[in-house]
Amino acid sequence: MTIGNTNIVGTLRPKLTKDELAWLKVELEDQRKRYDKIVQEQEALTPQREKWVKEFMERIQVRGVHVHFNIRRVVPKSEIRPRDGRPLQVIY
Amino acid sequence: MARPHIEPFVDRDVSFKKLTMPGFKPGVNYKMLSIDKDTGACTMTVQYDAGFKQPPGFCYSEHEFLLMEGSLTIGGKKWQKGLYSFVPAGVSLPAMSTDEGALLLVFYNFGPPSFVESDKDHQNADRTDFKMVDSYQGMDWQNSTLFPATAPGCLLKILHIDKRTFGMTFLYCMTPGFWQDNISYHDCAEEAYHIWGTSWMMQFGELPTGGYFWRPAYINHGCFASELGILAIGRTDGDLHNYFHHDPFSTPEENHERAASRLARMKPALYNWILTSEHNHLPHDFEYPNDTYKTEGWDTGIHMHDDGQVHHHSASGAHSHLGGNKKKKKK
């Protein structure tokens, strides 16, 4: 399968039937609610996440950041990009 | 691929629904994990009631499934948990039944669930990639062969690779005490389901047994850890490259741009070739001459051009953007 690829090998009936469209409509509404709930839950996690990020930024300057498999590299402070007020958005 | 960012979602928090689509026999229950708004392609946990029986038949969409609990008898052979099957569109599966019931994870990759009773394949089916394997007892764990690779303690079993896209389906596990201190993103969408165990990610917190995510391309995830280990199944819709970094605040747009700049650095001949006005069109592969591509939604974002400017497109369609720096060919 491919992002954007419309090769129909993956489906032999690309046009949805009336029953499938009705089912899809219900499922998409459920998914919208699921998404909204996730956004709320993740928003509530923000204070904890900020602490995790702070700990991560400290760790990589001491223990190092993984660059490949078991290879780690200690990140000098000069390589830490300033936050400059950037938000910590995680759901898009 | 039009699925929203669903992460995390725990299916243990919701009840099964009956699948009443035409063609399906009674006794099929499901929990929807994610679904494509355009095609109906979806990923679901599916439960067959004890005593469920299904005659031979095919699905119009390519689909994959992993048997996670219970047992399934397919074509007279009894399978236990760990059965993985890749079923190309239109390939007829033999009669299926379960005495004790079964719990599966099912990926419908291109369309909604469908079932047509038939002991023959659809006339246009290609059964080349069909497979059924015991992924638990019949396959060995391996270290990742990707470069760069995940940290030691994250092991893989590759279940299926799409030969055109390198999209893949894989079991993965994290050993107890696993940790990986970096942030990652990919060029592809990625989805995963926790069969057992809890892992943690810096962005999303803990993902327990029954936890699932569908994550579009270029979204940060990590660092990672698991105290007691996990067993999970994952799937991508394209080649999985780990773009590691350590900036928790970078956006998908920045990540996308970083990936493109790496392409320019690492494959300059390809990058430059694509940029030329003669070649900035929908790609053609002589090996797969019938492939076509959707363009809607793929050039509507903000992106850079060779004149160093950033701008936004509201129109779709392939077009060239060599502006002020365009090099004229010598005649």
Image (cartoon, rainbow, N blue to C red):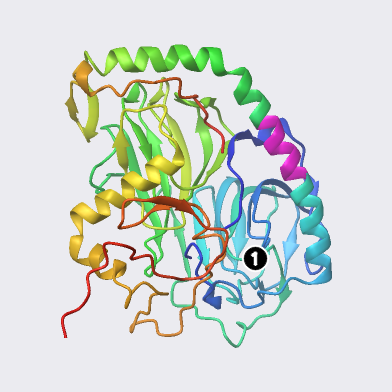
Q: Residue at x 39, y 40 (%)?
A: B254
B300 to B225, vertically: above or below: below
Which chain is home to disc 1?
B
Q: Residue at x 62, y 35 (%)?
A: B9
Q: How many labels were placed on the picture?
A: 1
Q: Quadrant of the C terminus of chain B?
A: bottom left
Q: Quadrant of the N terminus of chain B?
A: bottom right
From the viewer's perspective, tell me whether residue A2 is left or right of residue B11: left
Pick out the residue farthest to the front: B324
Residue with the mark numbered 1: B111
What type is the residue that disc 1 sits on?
Answer: Gly
- In this rendered view, identify the residue nearer to me: B126 or B213: B213
From the viewer's perspective, tell me whether residue A26 is left or right of residue B136: right
Q: Residue at x 53, y 38 (%)?
A: B195
Q: What x and y, as percent, mark residue B291?
A: 46, 79
- In this rendered view, identify the residue nearer to me: B307 or B47: B307
Task: Specify the quadrant of the image occupied by residue B11.
Answer: top right
Q: What x and y, as percent, mark residue B142?
A: 28, 45
Q: Which residues are magenta?
A: A30-38
Q: Is residue A35 magenta?
A: yes
Task: Specify the quadrant of the image occupied by residue A39.
Answer: top right
- Element at badge 1? loop
From the viewer's perspective, tell me whether residue B122 is left or right of residue A25: left
Most common SS among magenta residues: helix
Q: Is residue B197 magenta?
A: no
- Residue B140 visible within the image: no
Q: Residue at x 63, y 33 (%)?
A: B10
B26 to B90, vertically: above or below: above
